[in-house]
Amino acid sequence: MVDIRLLGRFSARRDGEEIPPTAFGGRLVRILVRLLVTRRGEFVSHDVLAEALWPGRLPADPVANLQVLVNRARRALGDPSLVVTGPGGYAFAVDGRCIVDGERFVGLVAEGREHFAAGHPVAALRTFREALERWGEPLAEDAYEDWAQAYRTRLARVHLQALEDGTTAALAARDPAGAVVLAEQAVEREPLREIAHLLLAQAFAASGDSVAAVRTIDGLRRRLADELGLDLSPEVRELDRHLLRGQPPGPVRTRPRAMPETAGFFELPFVGRDRELGTILEALHGARPGIVLLSGASGAGKSRLLAEVAARSSVPVLGARAFAPEREAAWSMARSALREALSLDLDVARVLAGRAASALARILPELDELRSPEQDVAVDAEGVRALALEAAVRLLESAASAGALLLADDLQWADATSLSLLSAALLRIPQLGAVLAYRPEEVGSDGPVASFLADLETQWARVATLALPSLSREAIGELVVDQELVDVIVRATVATPLAVTEVVRTLAGHGDVERDPDGRWRARTHEAIGTAAEVARMGEVRSIAARVARQPASRRELLSLLALLGRETPARILATATKARQASVLDHLDGLTQAGLVRIGDAGWAPAHDLVGEMIVERLGGAQRGRMHEILARALTTERGDVSEVARHLAGAGDRAAAAHAYADAARDRLERVEAAEAGRLADAGLRLDPDLTVRAALLEIRAEGRAVLGDLEAARADLRAVLGMRRSGSERSRTMSRIAMLTLGDDFARAEELVEMALTEAGSDAGARAEALTVAAFVDVNTGRLDRVDTRSTEALTLFEQLGDSRGAARILDARAGQRLFQGRIPEAADMYDRAARLYLDSGNLLQAGTPRGYRGWCLALMGRAEEGLADVD
């Protein structure tokens, strides 16, 4: 059984378990499923689907692109026959294998009407309430899409019908308090709808509050006259006369129940940022769009502004977002932007070929289904990384050939690899504009993000900077009618969009405000101003905390786990952590979503706002936080999660030794993939835990290699000298000395020679350590002019490497011997050795290492009078 949710953010479940958003293989596949489900049983043509998925810029072959997306949808849903191929299009099957919450909502409303028509108002009311509990904004992600409007309008009409018919049923069932609650929501949805006001007046009268009933009718009379120039209908005038002729009303006999916390509240309109929006759009206009650095504190509205920029963009948008726990996970931010680029036209994958495509497919597995099978070619980690970065730039370049816009959110948490890709793409792709949003207080003065931003402002002439201020009084006045409410918000809050949202959300939850015909909020009770002042004084953090405190314990636990995870997470991991059924976890997540505390994104569930997660983490007690970290470490280990994330939670749980071991494993993994910056950060995290000597030495070695890759040789040598001090004798000490010698070679030949002689002594009978030391010794001898020793040492090293089956080591020693021959003027011999070294590098997959000997061979050939051959080698 597949269960698809369209009321609120899209989600899908199979047999009670979540189909993770990532299972669909991209945003477009999820849109395709939503579109087909809203027209279930109807064949939707290729043209309609293509226009909805690629508005404004169709791919070269829309039908072929659709076929790929449909295949991904079928695979994710787990039942290929749910998406039916028909004449010129596709349809979503209509049968019992799939339930859709929107259809269930409509069915329950119809069922309630049947109960009422049959004379069973209590059963009708119960059914209407069950339907309304399922309500959420239909197709919330697609609110501005043309294809979604008919479905959204139809569901909104049914929702209003449920409120009005529910009010009628409540009155018939002698539940006037319930009738007031439902009728108030109906009036809020349609402030000029007469039947809703009539029902509300009847509900007030039935509850004994004739004054409120008369006030309701009087308010309607003024609205109709002011807005439409109309008078009340005879039915409403009759009720008004009846109420006015009656006895003075007594006290309200039954206090209406509080409205549901999110009733009538989804998201505040976009206001107060028109100037900033105009500045961004102007910067992005033209044949060579610019780069905008958008800064602001948490809650300032950066994400909302990016969404508005995306909605107004005339070119395709590539979205990306970083998360704090993924700073050491290479490609984590870039991966989503690359998937967006690929989705614009799946044919862009064909600009990639051979090794480059294979390398990028390790980052984007979906590339494999878009290209012809090729024979795997050995490529080392360094080559894979370089090829993947180059392929990623070419993929973005192809997608942006006619213009594109990259929107990156929370850049302060971006990983170093994603920043490298972003820097290369912005430099090489003139048609690619970008808006990069970040929190300045989180960037600091050093680190990869600070360096990236500094480089941007110095190297790119088309960079504009924009800081988001608080909302002005006028902007808040566009949201709130009553000036007293505006005064309270301006005076007592920081006036960020988040702060204003929290005040209005709380007031709406208490039923103290309502929307006017223009959609602005106004007070509907005398308590509204006092409540607003109290909420404003609390601040958004305490207001959110109060909302969290009202949640059941099981939901608060899920919120705490999500906050500590700090990233989008599939429900499966939460179920493993809490040892609960996924169905139960998903129900709780739905409730938290309704309360505005949780959202579902492209990769899973997360706190609705960073501030929500940060507030929860800050308020967790030490023992409780440690227990939660321990739960998450265990769950992530069970789910084979990233070792660096396991390490973070082990550290949070207080298991410093296990955490340090895990950080070492994670850092080593990053280093093996030549992700030097990420490896260094993980090594730093492990070293801060003061591990035992063995782990400390491993972490220092990893950090040293990472620093060497990044060019910080002095710091790398310092780390290795510290490691040397932890090792008494033997092959490990020899290898460390050899490495320090190699890193010293360019600065101090004498010191390098001294170290390598000691390394040879320490190596003893260990063939591998001796071969490494001899290799460095050969390079030292070449550079110090002791060419007579090169042959002896390099011959021994080559023999050892061949015995060990180490072709890369053999290539390095041949490289050194070729350098000796070149210095001696024995050019043909040098050319031959350079050729053998290059071939060995290539055969072992060391593509980048092959470049130097191949280039030197070209120089040798030129010196030998074979310039054309030499040029081919250089090429």
Image (tube, rainbow, N blue to C red):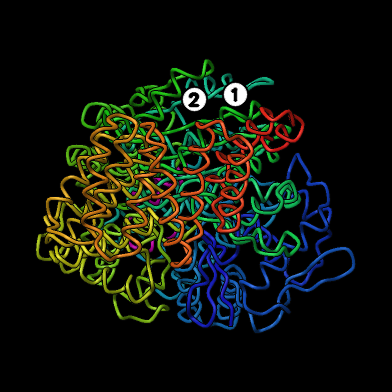
Q: Residue furthest right?
A: 87
Quadrant assignment for the N terminus: bottom right
What residue is shown with label 1?
284
Element on which disc 2 rests: strand
As drawn, which residue projects farthest toward the front?
A: 788
Relative image position of residue 126 (x, y in whole percent): 45, 77
For badge 2, the amino acid type reads Val
Distance in Å between CA atoms under marks 1 and 2: 8 Å
Q: Would you say 646 lies left or right of 813 here? A: left
Question: Is there a contact, CB below 8 Å, between mark 1 and mark 2?
Answer: yes
Q: Is residue 204 visible?
A: no
> On the image, numbered disc 2 is attached to which residue?
292
Residue under the point 21% across and 57% down: 762
Locate residue 622 relative to residue 672 in the image: left or right.
left
**Snapshot quadrant of residue 98:** bottom right
Residue at 25% x, 69% y is: 552
Dominant secondary structure (helix, strand or loop) of the stretch shown in magenta: helix
Q: Residue at coordinates 44% horizontally, 17% vertically from top-left?
A: 458
Query: Disc 1 marks which amino acid?
Result: Leu
Q: Where's residue 261, x and y in %?
A: 34, 57
Q: Is residue 305 visible?
A: yes
Q: Looking at the image, which is closer to me, 468 or 408?
A: 408
Residue 501: which quarter of the image?
top left
Does the magenta-highlighted stretch encompass residue 206?
yes
Report the span colored magenta: 202-219
Q: Which mark is residue 435?
A: none
